[in-house]
Image (spheres, rainbow, N blue to C red):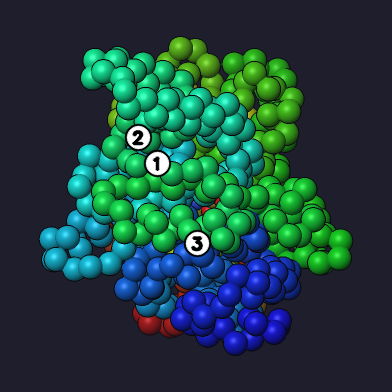
Amino acid sequence: MGGILNDINSPDDIKKLDINQLEELAAEIRAFLIDNVSKTGGHLASNLGIVELTLALHCVFNTPTDKIIWDVGHQSYVHKIITGRKDKFCTLRQLDGISGFPKVNECEHDAFNTGHSSTSISAALGMAKARDIRKEKYSVIALIGDGALTGGMAFEALNDAGRSPNNLIVILNDNEMSISKNVGGLSKYLRKIRTEPFYFKVKEDLDIILNKIPAIGRSAVKALGKVKGSVKYMIMPGIFFEELGFKYFGPIDGHDLVELNEVLTRVKTMKGPILLHVCTQKGRGYTFAEESPHLFHGISPFEIETGEVLSAGGPSYSDVFGSELTDLAETDENIVAITAAMPNGTGLDQFSKRFHDRFFDVGIAEQHAVTFAAGLARNGLKPVFAVYSSFLQRSYDQLLHDVALQNLHVVFGVDRAGIVGEDGETHQGLYDLSFLSHIPNFTIMAPCDYDEMRKMIRFAFSEHTGPVAIRYPRGKGKDRLIDSSEIKLGQGVLYKEGSDLTFLSIGTMFETALKVTEELTKLGVSVELINARFVKPLDVKLIVNSVMKTKKMITLEDNTITGGFGSSVLEMINQRGINVKSKLFGFPDQPIIHGSKNQLFKRYKLDAESLVGEILKLCKKQ
Ligand SMILES: Cc1ncc(C[n+]2csc(CCOP(=O)(O)OP(=O)(O)O)c2C)c(N)n1
Ligand SMILES: CC(=O)[C@@H](O)[C@H](O)COP(=O)(O)O
Ligand SMILES: [Mg+2]
């Protein structure tokens, strides 16, 4: 660890440093970030870009009294390092280590939990109002990226905050990047502010003219004022924010500590809503991240000298989804694909290159994406929205109101379903089976391997109409876990017959189910193993016949137990008056922590060894 960073234990230590020391500290923090994240993995590029801004914030403001809300929160590493978590930083995102996102329970300097984008301005406005109603005194700052600003909630909050009298500082960290290049009209507008100094020049000239003609009569001043008013749309940077009611400052260089300190000190005492536009470079200080900020946005452990990730290659579920979709789209020109700012993560990059005109990146706007897909489907296209399970949570009403009630043929690639691992509780995809199951007209499938996924994709586009979700996990799987037949609506697969116990598994948990079955068979338990394939509609005939025979049933899913696959099965057999001994295996109804996927399966007793023990107990209790 570097010389100055060694002595930084709290934000007070930052405040004692002069400008040269702060600059030296910024360089040490960058080296510290690169070194640590190369081992733990994490959101490197965003943090490298925000070092000076974070230092300046802690020079000018006093956390935990002042509140900083980090939008998404993936860029809060520097803040964590400064606020007493430097020594624990090597545990970042590891089981029982510190989180990769702000957590109020982890540290008093974290004012609000984040993880999903575009929430910071709403939360900050709520905090500012609470402060004023309670007559307390502190600053509230929302720090939001240009990507997160494309999310609908951010606009809703700006609209509300702009007309509110409460003191509130919104800092827009503009690095021209979401995970990929940022998209949309607002992004274009920000670029204009950044790159066309003409706009400022004209504004300055007009201000000078108006202020420097004292002899001029009142009417002439008024007239000139009007001139200024009418041209200000053309010439004022930040007019969009000004018209909403914010005082706009910027754009300022987010790597210039002197400028940052000056401006932050100035806005700290200003009244009403302020928007400070800060320009930064994503990945700054590490060549590989500067050149490919999208690759270093969220990176697995890597080699510092080469920038190469250390994990083994091979396609992931997302890659297989993207390539099968691209193949299918060659022969079906009605297929179009949508992403909400995640073309790489969802594997749609291949499709986007091949079918540029049939691909839509709508920005971080999951709600819009779903209703946009509904519109496309209504007018004859076959849209697919590939989206992470946890971000689809945003679109519940759109799924129901806009897609399902009209029974529109929209395909959902529900990626990162199940445990995601190191991102932790905000990102675990553990709820989709529950929130999709009760939506009318929805069909829900989950493949156990790549081969089955390919078949499900073809089924979803070619043989099905109506809303259909295919859910699959983060990372890699097996190409062929088992030989699989074609997909038929609502049909599961009886993999192995048995007489003691019906074992119903959904999706990629089937790999664990196979191991458990093998072990139980060795121990003398005759297991009837079923790969359910469908959560909705369930294979009623197959399940009912099996449980009537065995009188004992377990279900296994990588979803929360509440309202998930097992719940649906129980409901179905209960409605038929069938009485069987049963146990549902899935994640408990509580936030699920971070750690590697395997560690978490073990921690929550969903690994093969724990399951064998639990199932044996169930078999003995009769
Ligand atoms: C609702 C939601 N959708 C998608 C994401 C995934 N995501 C995390 S960060 C990010 C890009 C954010 O860009 P920006 O706010 O500009 O921050 P930067 O990484 O550029 O610092 C995206 C799309 C998310 N966290 N939440
Ligand atoms: C912060 C955020 O929401 C994303 O960057 C997310 O961490 C990406 O996850 P994957 O690494 O699974 O693509
Ligand atoms: Mg950005």
201 shown above or below 446: above
Which of marks 2 and 3 precedes in the sequence? 2
Which of marks 1 and 2 precedes in the sequence? 2
What crowding class fits label 1: few (fewer than 14 Cα within 10 Å), some (14-19), or many (20 or more)?
many
Left or right, 222 with respect to 249, comes to left
Q: Quadrant of the N terminus?
A: bottom right
Q: Do the CB atoms of the residues marked 1 and 3 lie less than 8 Å apart?
A: no
The residue located at (49%, 77%) in the rendering is 15
Q: Secondary structure at mark 3?
A: helix
Residue type beneath disc 1: Tyr
Left or right, 478 with respect to 156, comes to right
Q: CA distance from mark 3 to mark 2?
A: 23 Å
Q: Do the CB atoms of the residues marked 2 and 1 lie less than 8 Å apart?
A: yes
Residue type beneath disc 3: Asn
356 shown above or below 391: above
Determine which residue is flagged by label 1. 248
Determine which residue is flagged by label 2. 242
Determine which residue is flagged by label 3. 261
